[in-house]
Image (cartoon, rainbow, N blue to C red):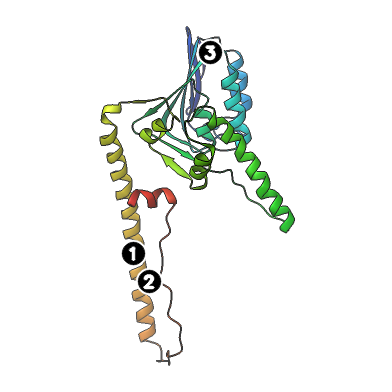
Amino acid sequence: MIAVNKKYYSLVQENNEATINIYGDITSWEWFESDVSSYTLSKELEVIEADTIHVYINSYGGEVAEGLAIYNALKRHKAKIITHTDGFACSIASVIFMAGDERIMSTASLLMIHNAWTYAKGNANELRKQADDLDVITQASINAYMMDINITEDELKQLLDNETWLSPQSALDMNFCTSIVNEKDSNKASQSVKKSLSKMILDIQNKNKIKESTEDLGEKNNQENEPQQNNDNKEPEEPKQILMGSFFNALLK
């Protein structure tokens, strides 16, 4: 039996099966015990002599180069690879998920796919080049998805442009995953997760509204204590907005 145990990333081999848990960021710099690099994982894969390797994923993603290297290392291995989403498989972690010969999603799990992105600075020519480079980098992930999914590349690119969250059933329909565990209860579980997240978001919005009301009341009291001024030419203020991430906005619809 071979065991490499960390709190979030671990490798365990027993008999003819091995288990790898990826529960953190995909990065070349393993600052935290939850981080995993392609170097660490590929070295550990070299010593695995198993017929089946299970890879359990719960990750927001990380560096594209590291994720692609992990994807290719898993695809190269002679064992049958079975990938599982235990929570989120986002960004490049969703590409690692696609390395599975079998790809299994829990009813209470999600995939998220989007285009590669980066921070950039420079002149106009440098920024244009950066945009072109990102298109090429994204294409590498597209190639991995297209090995198994049953939609067209144009349809996939639209999903990437929209930064799409995929439920287990949507992923199954497009062949991102090959099966769903606890499929009978999938609708009930998905609605429960959605309801809990929606409540959390509404609570945050209500707290923000209370904060804004308090601030507005304070401003009103200050104005009452100040000399009155002619506001005929004052432009109306734009209403305040609470901006939420695309995922959370989608949940509230």
| Left or right side of 75 for 241 | left
Q: Amino acid at mark 2?
A: Glu
Disc 3 to disc 1: CB gap under 8 Å? no
Distance from disc 2 to disc 1, alpha carbons, whole Å, reads: 10 Å
Q: Amino acid at mark 3?
A: Ala
Q: Quadrant of residue 191?
A: top left
Q: Which residue is mark 1?
A: 209
The secondary structure type at the circle numbered 1 is helix
For mark 2, does the 10 Å Cα neighbourhood hold few (<14), some (14 to 19), or many (20 or more) residues?
A: few
Please tell me the numbered disc located at residue 79.
3
Q: Residue at x 42, y 91 (%)?
A: 232
Labels in figure, total: 3
Q: Residue at x 35, y 48 (%)?
A: 251
For mark 1, does the 10 Å Cα neighbourhood hold few (<14), some (14 to 19), or many (20 or more) residues?
A: some
| Left or right side of 241 for 51 | right
Of residues 28 and 164, the one nearer the viewer is 164
Viewer-nearest of discs 2 and 1: 1
Q: Quadrant of residue 146?
A: top right
Mark closer to the chain start, 3 or 1: 3
Please tell me the numbered disc located at residue 215.
2
Instruction: Tell me where residue 184 appears, x and y as whole percent.
Output: 26, 27
Mark closer to the chain start, 3 or 2: 3
Q: From the viewer's perspective, is residue 210 above or below residue 158?
A: below
Distance from disc 3 to disc 2, alpha carbons, whole Å, reads: 61 Å
Instruction: Tell me where residue 234 appears, x and y as whole percent.
Output: 45, 86
Of residues 125 and 70, the one nearer the viewer is 125
For mark 3, does the 10 Å Cα neighbourhood hold few (<14), some (14 to 19), or many (20 or more) residues?
A: some
Distance from disc 3 to disc 1, alpha carbons, whole Å, reads: 54 Å
Q: Residue at x 42, y 80 (%)?
A: 236
Residue 16 seen from this side = yes
